[in-house]
Every structure is written in C-alpha cells, then in structure tokens.
Amino acid sequence: MEEIKTQTTPSPVRMNPDKIAGVDLTAGEPFLAPEDLLEGNHRPRGDALYWGKELVVEIYEDDPGTHAITNPFPVDEYVMVLSGKLILTDADGQMQEFVAGDSLMVPKGFTGTWQMLGNYRELIVVERESYENALKAGEE
C-alpha cells in the first residue's frame, strides 16, 4: 500500500490521479466469506489516498461478482463509481443501479446484495474511527 504522509500543518492533498484511474493498485486480501460470494470472483485491489483525523479516502477495484451483505454494513460510506456498474439490492428487494460518475451513500446497517459489473472501480470516503473499528472486527 502506498505510504500516506502525515501532515504537520493542514494543507490540501491532491488525490493520486493514477490510482483513481486504476493504475498499479495494490492487490488486497479477499475479505468476503466464501458463502457470501454468490457469483463471479472476489479479487480486491486498492489503495488509500488519504488518512485524515476524521476521514479516509480510498480507491477500491474488484472483479465482476455479486456478494451478499448479511451482516449489517458497519459504516456510512460515500461511493463514487469510477468505472463499471454497481447494482445494490436492499433487504426489501429494492434494486438501484449506479454507473461511472454516479455518487451514492451506503448507509450503516445496509443488508442485501452488492453486484459489480465490468471493470468495477470506486472511490470511497468513510469516517476514520468507524472504518478502523470495522477493519479490526473483520480481522477477529
């Protein structure tokens, strides 16, 4: 993962345009339980663009696939679809489609299915403390 420098004084941080374009993203460890992968593959890639005191900004990319979100989503997550298509279906069966350029919020507590089509890549923004807690819980 690319090193994110800690700032001593607040200053704007340019988001790495190569990472946003999907160039040389770091391969990640699969984090989905095998039983939650409904179809396709799960080969996550991504990098952090910013770790601030309150927010985290990352690029995430994955192979086409559909997975079940059976445990309530652990954070409020802002998503901007950069490439491919995202289809989210909530627990009530309401389906929404998002394509490159679309932005959405995935609310904490969401359950349903998450389907990625094409060369799916997204930019996410999450609250840092909640995100770190979710990552720690996933490691247990």
Image: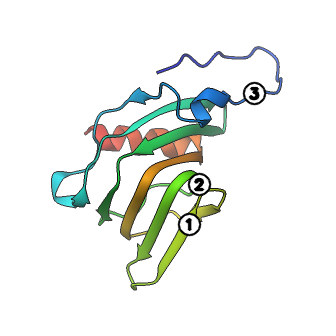
Residue 116, position as x, y percentages in the image: 41, 58
- Residue at image point 76% right, 26% down: 13
- Residue at image point 75% right, 27% down: 14
Instruction: Give the distance between the C-alpha atoms of the residues marked 2 and 3, in whole angstroms.
Output: 18 Å
| Nearer to us in this view, 20 or 29 | 20
Residue 91, position as x, y percentages in the image: 37, 79
Of the image marks 2 and 3, the number of the one nearer the N terminus = 3
| Nearer to us in this view, 90 or 131 | 90
Classify mark 2: helix, strand or loop.
strand
Q: Nearer the viewer, mark 1 or mark 3?
A: 1
Does any portion of residue 135 appear in the rendered image? yes
Q: In this view, does 106 lie above or below 11?
A: below
Question: Residue type at mark 3?
Answer: Arg
Of the image marks 1 and 3, the number of the one nearer the N terminus = 3
Question: Residue type at mark 1?
Answer: Phe
Look at mark 1 in the image and give the residue it sits on.
Answer: 98
Q: Which of marks 1 and 2 is in front?
A: 1
Does any portion of residue 109 appear in the rendered image? no
Q: Is residue 57 above or below residue 11?
A: below
Of the image marks 1 and 2, the number of the one nearer the N terminus = 2
Numbered mark located on residue 14 in the image: 3
Q: Is residue 29 left or right of residue 91?
A: left
Look at mark 2 in the image and give the residue it sits on.
Answer: 79
